[in-house]
Amino acid sequence: MIVAKFGGSSLSDSDQFLKVRRILLSDPARRYAVPSAPGRRHDCDHKVTDLLYRCHDMAAHGRDCAQVFAEIRTRYMNIAAELKLDVDIGGKLDEIERRIPLEPTPDYAASRGECLNGLLLAALLGWDYVDPADCVWFRDDGTFDSERTQIDCARLLLRHNYAVIPGFYGRMPDGSVRTFSRGGSDVTGAIVARAVDADLYENWTDVSGFLTADPRVVKNPRRIEQITYRELRELSYMGATVLHEDAIFPVRKAGIPINIRNTNEPDHPGTLILPHAQGEPLAGITGIAGRKGFAIIVIEKAMMNAELGFGRRVLQAVEECGISFEHLPTGIDTMCVVLHKEALDKARGRLITRIYELTEPDSIEIHEDMALIATVGRGMVRQRGMASRLFAALSDAQVNVRMIDQGSSELNIIVGVSSEDFEDAVRAIYAAFIDE
Ligand code: ADP
Ligand code: ASP
Ligand code: MG
């Protein structure tokens, strides 16, 4: 049994819907489909989800969102008309337009993108429609309730032989709609796969698999044939956005493999994500991913290493400011805290004051506009000279490395570089390991 999730670009217009239908009907094992909202049809296009967020935002500021909503309406009406679908999509759109200004949070508006796409896809296939608001649960504090969801999804979905269940949202105990973070339909796909105990979770997108680097940074990066859950988690957390970073948790529990496939190239095998991959990647590394938007706080104090509880006090300051940190490289007399720049900006004054009060350091320095790059590979621990090759490549590219963290998982080496060096650094690492 296969659960197939289709991303936004796979369902962006009626032609794409037909490709999706062909894929689903070509194998009767594909019994549950999880659609996203319509994505971009071309580079200058809008994602429907972005338009829905904009509508909510405008309404929340007392502005009329009719023009933006009209664009959303056209997208769905065109798909329904071109595919001659017997769904009252106009009536549903009226109801959504009326309700958006009444909702206190953007979640309801955002969720309608997948909801409507699900109704259209179910009609096109002649499959049942299952609303995730009836079986995907969040707790009062907004966190995802996996146990309750697993029980209710299993019970509800297994009553249907073939069903479409929209991605991205579920419901709170008070009845209101709640979404996952952006890209969250990947998470729904994984939840459904676990609930029905699927043999495979197919994730259909617009690239032929997980690539060894971001195709927007490296030209034609090589594809990864097989990757383990752990490697995938490292890469997706660090910016390989092809799969939501939380999508592996539900399937990992059940050991269900994920297959990343391309809706526009359906015969391509894509990438297989497995609990344990066979063999090791030829290049020694599996992939490279990175993100901008970090900051590093460097705290220096002579004899810090001998001072009991120093690290705890630094982290206490970070915690008091409600910030979670990313990395914590330490030296003898220095300790660095790597965190999201956005989080730092919200609490900068208070955080620095608290670190001074609690630790009485000699100095505190902040490096802004940092990017982190992870070079990930299950074979890295066993190969000598990996780190030296990495740093030689960066130094040849004249990239200054501000921070190094060889993950204790022994699966990756993370470097911090200035944001302006980000692209050059990724290309240099790619050239050194993969494109030799
Ligand atoms: P979907 O709408 O199908 O969920 P996404 O836009 O979320 O698709 O993810 C696919 C995109 O991820 C690709 O078009 C590509 O630009 C980007 N991407 C970033 N890093 C990688 C990578 N390592 N491998 C493949 N794609 C990547
Ligand atoms: N449509 C949502 C988004 O744009 C969820 C998804 O595509 O996975 O974030
Ligand atoms: Mg996505």
Image (cartoon, grey):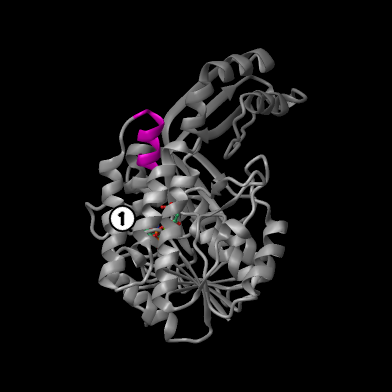
Whether 105 is drawn above or below 346: the answer is below
180 vs 67, left or right, is right
| Picture quarter with the C terminus | bottom left
Q: Which residue is at a point 69% across and 25% down the rendered structure image?
A: 316
Q: Position of residue 124 (x, y in %)?
A: 39, 75
308 vs 138, left or right, is right
Q: Which residue is mark 1?
A: 216
Whether 66 is drawn above or below 238: the answer is above
Whether 288 is drawn above or below 373: the answer is below
Q: Which residue is at a point 40% across and 63% down the rendered structure image?
A: 117
Amino acid at circle 1: Arg
Secondary structure at numbered mark 1: loop
State the residue in front, 49 or 277: 49
Magenta stretch holds residue 60: yes
Q: Position of residue 378 (x, y in %)?
A: 57, 64
Q: Residue furthest right?
A: 308
For label 1, the crowd category at 10 Å Cα-Cα, with few meaning under 14, some 14 to 19 and many 20 or more, is few
| Picture quarter with the N terminus | bottom right
Q: Position of residue 248 (x, y in %)?
A: 59, 61
What span is in magenta? 53-62
> Residue 418: in sight, yes or no?
yes
Q: Position of residue 391 (x, y in %)?
A: 44, 48
Q: Main secondary structure of the magenta part?
A: helix
Some atom of ligand 1 lies within 8 Å of the CB belonging to the residue at label 1: yes
